[in-house]
């Protein structure tokens, strides 16, 4: 294990920020010297289709696969796996999309082995019934989704659906799932537009989560789409997080081809490493065989 515990007052313990969890994206973890610091609250700020969802799918599938099949670590991560530390649990929380919807997207986008790993091993928590409750969405549309959901009842891990009119049950769910684990919340975008909780209250919850996450020994990722919030409000939300991963599309000046890029606006425990190696951003791609992949780390020469 990298790092250790620092004893604080009253005998409490705080996890050293140099301890890291693998994300399952080995091309990403290798640059970060093992992965994401334990205790990190991470905002994935993304252009539409720029890779945040695919990063989450890939990470959740690969980490859950090696958790249940330790013999797959060498296959999934190569020789680098012996230096990695893995979370004990991986959870995907969906605010507005049913499990079937998410799984169909993964099935169409990735190799069957990766798609199957997500389907069989990832703990999936579906809040979509609560999200649409009280809205103008016809009830029979939601019933159709529930009927399809029956196909997955015996194949997924903890495929529970949560009804929560107040929108607060997710707090308890995330707390339990984040203990010694990684949680992906898809998405903060949905939580913002749902209006069950005002932005100020949501920011307070995020700041409180950030405060206690070290004690839980967890990492939580929230996806937020660019342009949903006014610029000043977006800045205030960013301030609630330890890290901001920015997923974007860049058009080449020499052609009309677009390229996905990832860079960090801030990341405690990570940016010093990237600065030392003069890394400014990563070019990325979505591979059918491997999911989200870091193709190249661009450096200032």
Image (spheres, helix red, strand yellow):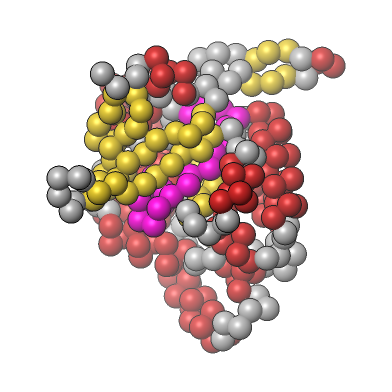
Q: Nearer the viewer, residue 189 or 87?
A: 189
Q: Residue at x 36, y 47 (%)?
A: 248
- The span picked out in magenta is 36-55
Q: Would residue 229 be found to the left or right of residue 76 on screen? A: right
Give the answer, above or below, for where 126 lies relative to 267.
below
Q: Would residue 120 be found to the left or right of residue 252 on screen? A: right
Q: Nearer the viewer, residue 294 or 288?
A: 294
Q: Give the image location of residue 75, x and y in percent.
A: 27, 32
Q: Quadrant of the C terminus?
A: top left
Q: Residue furthest left?
A: 254
Examine the image and state in which quarter residue 170 appears.
bottom right
Residue 295 visible to the viewer? yes
Q: Residue furthest right?
A: 10
Q: Would residue 107 be found to the left or right of residue 173 on screen? A: left
Question: Does the magenta-highlighted stretch encompass residue 38?
Answer: yes
Q: Nearer the viewer, residue 274 or 138?
A: 274
Q: Give the image location of residue 153, x and y in percent.
A: 49, 65
Question: Does the magenta-highlighted stretch encompass residue 108?
Answer: no
Q: Give the image location of residue 95, x and y in percent.
A: 57, 61
Give the answer, above or below, for where 109 lies relative to 67.
below
Q: Residue at x 48, y 71 (%)?
A: 149
Q: Give the image location of residue 97, x and y in percent.
A: 50, 66
């Amino acid at each position: 294990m990298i790092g250790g515990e620092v004893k604080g007052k009253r005998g409490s313990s705080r996890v050293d920020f140099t301890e890291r969890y693998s994300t399952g994206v080995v091309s990403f973890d290798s640059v970060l010297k093992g992965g994401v610091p334990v205790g990190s609250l991470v905002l994935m700020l993304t252009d539409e289709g720029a890779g945040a969802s695919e990063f989450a799918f890939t990470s959740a599938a690969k980490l859950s696969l090696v958790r249940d099949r330790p013999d797959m670590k060498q296959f999934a991560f190569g020789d680098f796996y012996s230096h990695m530390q893995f979370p004990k649990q991986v959870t995907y929380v969906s605010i507005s999309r049913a499990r079937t919807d998410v799984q169909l997207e993964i099935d169409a986008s990735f190799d069957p082995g990766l798609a199957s790993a997500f389907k069989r091993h990832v703990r999936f928590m579906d809040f979509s019934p609560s999200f649409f409750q009280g809205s103008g969405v016809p009830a029979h549309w939601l019933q159709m989704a529930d009927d399809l959901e029956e196909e997955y009842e015996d194949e997924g891990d903890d495929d529970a659906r949560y009804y929560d009119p107040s929108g607060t049950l997710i707090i308890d769910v995330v707390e339990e799932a984040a203990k010694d684990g990684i949680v992906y919340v898809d998405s903060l975008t949905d939580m913002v537009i749902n209006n069950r909780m005002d932005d100020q209250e949501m920011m307070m919850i995020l700041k409180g989560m950030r405060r206690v996450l070290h004690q839980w020994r967890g990492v939580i990722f929230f996806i937020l789409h660019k342009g949903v919030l006014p610029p000043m409000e977006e800045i205030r939300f960013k301030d609630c997080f330890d890290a901001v991963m920015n997923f974007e599309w860049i058009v080449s000046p020499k052609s009309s081809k677009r390229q996905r890029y990832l860079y960090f606006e801030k990341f405690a425990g990570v940016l010093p490493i990237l600065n030392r190696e003069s890394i400014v951003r990563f070019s990325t791609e979505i591979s059918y065989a491997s999911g989200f992949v870091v193709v190249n780390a661009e450096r200032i020469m």
